[in-house]
Amino acid sequence: MVIGLEVHCQLNTKSKIFAADHNSFGAEPNTHIGVLTLAHPGVLPRTNREVVDSAVKLGLAFGSTINRMNYFDRKNYFYPDLPKGYQVTQDSRPVCVGGSVRFVLKESRSYREHEVKVHHIHMEEDAGKSVHTADGTLLDYNRAGAPLLEIVSYPCISSPEEAAGYLAEIRRIVRFLGISDGNMEEGSLRADLNVSLKPKGSEVLGTKVEIKNMNSIRFLQRAAEFEIRRQAGVLQAGGQLIQETRTFIPETGETESMRVKETANDYRYFPESDLAPVQISEEKIEALKAGIPALPYTLFHTFVSQYGLSEDNAYVLSEEKELSDYFLETIRHTPHCKPVSNWMVSYMRGDMNERGIGINDYPVRPGQLAELVNAIEDGKFSHSVGQKLMVLLVENSGNGGSQANLMALAESKGWVLNQDTSRITEWVEEVLVRNKSKVEEFKKGKKGLLGMFVGEVMKLSGGSADPKEVNKVIMEKLK
């Protein structure tokens, strides 16, 4: 199997790529339109500077070569939701050439490295939206002219799982860069899936079939799995495949034919005469490069190798920039990196899901989490007490978050562990006197009674005794 993806990423600029019309999702139909969007005669477009900057950022993240001089082209085809009757895009000279996307995928119990090579990235405008109803087709031009980056991979993907992982990584990267929200449900990120089969060992690619407008990573994987089975069935039965465009039907998990695939000649590309060339200086490229944050693939390896996190925790914390930023800020205040990651992944993430909030809105801030982890690791209170304190910190988030407040809160509840050896010794001796028969059983080899002794001491202390110190004193007394 050979898979390639054409990923369309809608940018989050305030205005459209060639017009000042507002660029956002969810507005009333046909409210973000103007004479340029509607292609009135005589209007002249201008290129949105921020779109070019976003394209360069993405190219730098992929390790692409940036073309210093950029031109736009007209791609001629008619859709009712494309008012001009042509699309302004880049054909022969895209803004970014080459590069690759590196990512990890969990396979069995470990994470495996993957790399998908990118052919190019080009800038273009989006079309509008056709809304099909029982009474006819309605047209919404709000999206017409929205800025798009099209990311074209080489046909080098070898499984549906790898294709899904590649698309998921692109979504993570554009979010880290801040150039798109990557929301597939709203169409901010969508992909055209190209699938073909060839004889094993052959260098000649098979007939390519394209599945259009995949707006879900799960659907993309299902579509690829079905298409591979379908094409294999045709070939094994002695049939021939045709180059065509198909659509995926989520309800059935199958693809259906839409039309025979157009060729490049059908689009009659020619230079866009209304737009001036865009020149990108070396100074601009260096300035944009300096602002690119550490990206998910790099963070994953940093979290594992430098901070000693488990691969599972590292993967979760590198999925979203807000999570990785929170983690990195927290460990500025504590050396206990693994406990911090465990709190974030095992406790806080579930709490955030229940509350329907993200990490930036979570009431416990990095400094407070660091204080909590430090106190637990220093033996001031137990992990279970830490969970109780987290609940109180969330509920009383408006009362500040200094260490004094944290410890005062624990002390007011009687949750600070008592590490006074003499007091713990008194509790231990009292428990051992009460349980003389059990002491004899322990000395005869019934070592499982140790847990019972510890439990009794904890009850006697009202839960305030340090369990580690209790274990130590009991073992000394029972020698």
Image (cartoon, rainbow, N blue to C red):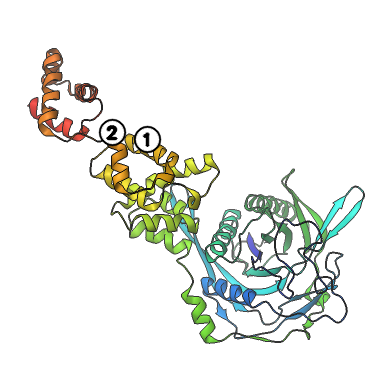
Callout 1 crowding tier (Cα within 10 Å): few <14, some 14–19, many ≥20: few
- Residue topped by disc 2: 415
Question: How far apart in space, not on screen, are marks 2 and 1 (Cα)?
Answer: 9 Å
Nearest to the observer: residue 201 or residue 308 = 308
Q: Which residue is mark 1?
A: 388
Residue furthest out toward the top: 437
Does residue 346 sit above or below 149 in this rendering?
Answer: above
Percent of width and height locating residue 405: 32, 44
Camera sees residue 295: yes
Residue 204 is situated, as x and y percent measured from the top left of the image, at: 66, 69
Q: In the drawing, does residue 120 fall left or right of residue 338?
A: right
Q: Residues within 10 Å of mark 2 (few under 14, many from 20)?
A: many
Tell me whether circle 2 and circle 1 mark residues in contact (CB < 8 Å).
yes
Between 113 and 439, the residue placed more toward the observer is 439
The part of the image, by quadrant, that contains residue 183 is bottom right
Quarter occupied by the N terminus:
bottom right
The image quadrant that residue 165 belongs to is bottom right
Q: Element under label 1? A: helix
Inspect the image, locate mark 2, and give the three-letter code of the amino acid beneath it.
Answer: Trp
Tell me if 236 is positioned left or right of 107 in this view. Answer: right
Question: Does 445 sit above or below residue 22?
Answer: above
